C-alpha cells in the first residue's frame, strides 16, 4: 500500500480507502488506485488539489466544473460511461469514487505506429456515439470529447469519463463557458453559440480522424491560426492522411466534423447508421460479429423490441459468437445445457427421435426452454447446421447473474415468444383438422 504525502491532508481517507498508487494527476485533482474497504472493491479515487477553489474567478469556475461531475454521480448509468459511485467532501478536499479503468486511455493509440485496427476503432466509436446519445437524452452534453477522456478497462472496453465540462440542458444553474480542448472544439464554439448535440458530434469526428491517422485535421503553431482554419478551411482529406480508409468511413468522419452545422449530423443515430454502413467494407477480425454489429443485429430482432439500449448492450456482454459448418450439431437431444442460441446467419434443422421437425432461419431462437426451467436441464431435440452458420450464444448462468432489469425483460420476452409458438402450433393443428 502506498503511503500518502504528509502535506496532502488526505490522511482521513485511510479510515476507508487503502491508497495503493497514484494513477494520474492534473491541475484540478489527483487520481489514485484505492481499495474501498466498505464496498470491498478496487476503485479510482479522484481527490481535488488544495486551493482548487481558492482564487475568486478561477476558483468559481473550477467549483462549477466540479459540481457538474458531482451532480451527475450515479445518474448516468450506461455500459460505456465510467460509473461514478459516490461524491463527497472532507474538511480539506472534495472527492469522487469511480469505477476503476486500468487500461489507460485512447490517447495511447493516437499516434502513427500505435493506431488501432480500423474495425476495432469503428466498434469503439459506435459505442461512444451510443453512450453520448444516451447522455444527450438525459439532458447532458459532454463538451470535451477527446482520446484522453475515453478510458479503457482491463479487457480493452472503452468508456467515456470526465463530465466536468458538461452542459446541462435546461439547468437553472450557471453553466461553465469557454470549455473544451482547442483541437476538438467545434467552430461555432468560437462564436459563442449555445452548445448542441452537434458540438459533441464534431469533437467525436475529430477524435475519429486523429485515431485513424495519428494526426489532427488541422495543424498550427498558434491558437489564432488554428481557430481561423477551423472557421474557414477544409481539413486535410482523410485519403491523403491514410490510404486504406474505405470511402463509407471517410464520409462518416468528414460529415461528423464538418464546419457547417447544417451539413453535420443532427442525430447520433444517423452517425451510428453510417458507421454501421462502413462495417462491411472493413477487414473482419476472427469474430463473426463485433460488439457494435451484435448490438445492431439485436436491435433489429423482434424479440428485443421492448429492450432499452442499455439492456441490449448488457446482453451483448454475455454473448459468445461462433461459426459452424453444415453438418455440425449445435445441440444434441439428451445432453445437458441451459444456454440459448440465436441464429445470425444460415439455417439449421431440428429433429427429435431421428424425425425432422422443421428448419430454423436467421433470427430464430432455440434452447430457451432449458433456461426457463433452470437447474441441470436435458435438451429435448437435436439442432444441426443445415448450412454454414453464424450463431450467437447467450450464456444461461451469465444471464441469471445479470441485472434484475435485464432478467425481467428476458423473462417477459421469452414468455411472449412461448405464447406465440403455442398459438402457431394450435393454428397448425386446427388447419390440419
Image (cartoon, helix red, strand yellow):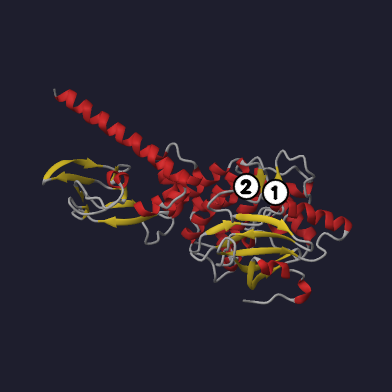
Residue 286, horizontal then vertical, whole percent: 37, 62
**Residue 406, visible in the rendered structure:** yes
- Front in this rendered view, residue 31 or 328: 31
What residue does disc 2 label?
75
Q: Quadrant of the N terminus?
A: bottom right
Mark sitting on residue 230: none
Say whether residue 53 is left or right of residue 73: right
Kindly identify the residue that appears in the image at 50 percent across and 44 percent down.
309
Image quadrant of residue 183? Answer: bottom right
Image quadrant of residue 229? Answer: bottom right
What residue does disc 1 label?
71
- Front in this rendered view, residue 140 or 177: 140
- The answer to the question of whether label 1 and label 2 lie on touching residues, with beta carbons closer than 8 A, is yes
- Residue farthest to the left, as pictured: 354
Image quadrant of residue 182? Answer: bottom right
Q: Residues within 10 Å of mark 2 (few under 14, many from 20)?
A: few
Kindly identify the residue that appears in the image at 30 percent across and 32 percent down.
419
**Residue 237, visible in the rendered structure:** no
Kindly identify the residue that appears in the image at 80 percent across and 62 percent down.
52
Residue 105, horizontal then vertical, whole percent: 59, 64
- Front in this rendered view, residue 376 or 43: 376
Residue 224, horizontal then vertical, whole percent: 80, 58
Residue 293, horizontal then vertical, whole percent: 43, 50
Q: Secondary structure at mark 1?
A: helix
The span from disc 1 to disc 2 (Cα, nearest Å) is 8 Å
Q: Quadrant of the C terminus?
A: top left
Placement of 183 over or under 261, stated as above or below? below
Placement of 302 over or under 406, stated as above or below? above
Q: Secondary structure at mark 2?
A: loop
Amino acid at each position: 500500500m502506498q503511503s500518502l504525502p504528509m502535506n496532502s491532508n488526505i490522511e482521513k481517507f485511510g479510515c476507508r480507502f487503502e491508497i495503493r498508487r497514484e494513477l494520474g494527476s492534473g491541475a484540478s485533482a489527483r487520481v489514485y488506485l484505492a481499495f474501498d474497504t466498505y464496498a470491498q472493491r478496487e476503485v479510482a479515487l479522484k481527490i481535488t488539489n488544495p486551493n482548487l477553489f481558492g482564487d475568486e474567478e478561477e476558483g468559481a469556475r473550477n467549483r462549477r466544473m466540479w459540481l457538474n461531475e458531482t451532480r451527475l454521480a450515479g445518474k448516468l448509468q450506461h455500459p460505456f460511461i465510467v460509473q461514478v459511485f459516490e461524491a463527497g467532501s472532507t474538511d480539506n478536499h472534495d472527492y469522487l469514487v469511480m469505477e476503476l479503468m486500468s487500461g489507460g486511455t485512447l490517447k495511447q493509440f493516437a499516434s502513427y505506429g500505435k493506431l488501432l485496427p480500423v474495425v476495432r476503432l469503428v466498434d469503439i466509436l459506435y459505442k461512444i456515439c451510443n453512450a453520448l446519445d444516451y447522455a444527450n437524452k438525459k439532458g447532458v452534453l459532454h463538451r470535451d470529447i477527446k482520446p484522453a477522456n475515453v478510458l479503457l478497462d482491463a479487457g480493452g472496453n472503452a468508456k467515456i469519463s470526465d463530465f466536468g465540462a458538461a452542459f446541462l440542458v435546461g439547468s437553472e444553474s450557471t453553466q461553465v463557458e469557454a470549455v473544451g480542448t482547442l483541437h476538438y472544439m467545434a467552430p461555432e464554439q468560437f462564436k459563442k453559440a449555445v452548445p448542441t448535440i452537434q458540438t459533441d458530434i464534431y469533437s467525436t469526428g475529430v477524435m475519429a480522424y486523429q485515431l485513424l491517422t495519428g494526426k489532427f485535421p488541422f495543424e498550427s503553431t498558434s491558437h489564432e491560426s488554428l481557430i481561423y482554419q477551423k472557421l474557414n478551411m477544409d481539413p486535410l482529406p482523410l485519403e491523403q492522411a491514410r490510404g486504406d480508409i474505405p470511402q463509407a468511413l471517410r464520409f462518416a468522419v468528414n460529415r461528423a466534423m464538418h464546419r457547417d452545422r447544417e451539413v453535420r449530423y443532427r442525430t447520433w443515430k444517423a452517425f451510428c447508421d453510417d458507421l454501421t454502413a462502413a462495417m462491411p467494407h472493413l477487414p473482419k477480425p476472427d469474430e463473426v460479429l463485433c460488439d457494435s454489429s451484435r448490438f445492431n443485429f439485436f436491435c433489429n430482432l423482434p424479440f428485443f423490441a421492448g429492450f432499452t439500449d442499455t439492456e441490449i448492450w448488457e446482453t451483448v456482454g454475455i454473448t459468445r459468437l461462433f461459426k459452424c459448418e453444415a453438418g455440425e450439431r449445435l445441440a444434441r437431444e439428451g445432453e445437458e445445457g441451459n444456454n440459448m442460441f440465436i441464429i445470425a446467419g444460415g439455417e439449421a434443422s431440428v429433429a427429435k427421435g431421428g424425425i425432422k421437425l422443421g428448419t430454423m432461419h436467421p433470427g430464430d431462437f432455440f434452447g430457451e426452454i432449458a433456461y426457463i426451467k433452470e437447474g441441470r436441464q436435458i435438451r429435448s431435440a437435436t439442432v444441426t447446421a443445415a448450412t454454414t452458420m453464424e450463431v450467437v450464444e447467450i450464456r444461461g448462468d451469465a444471464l441469471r447473474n445479470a441485472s434484475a432489469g435485464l432478467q425481467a425483460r428476458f423473462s417477459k420476452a421469452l414468455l411472449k415468444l412461448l405464447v406465440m409458438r403455442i398459438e402457431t402450433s394450435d393454428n397448425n393443428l386446427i388447419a390440419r383438422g
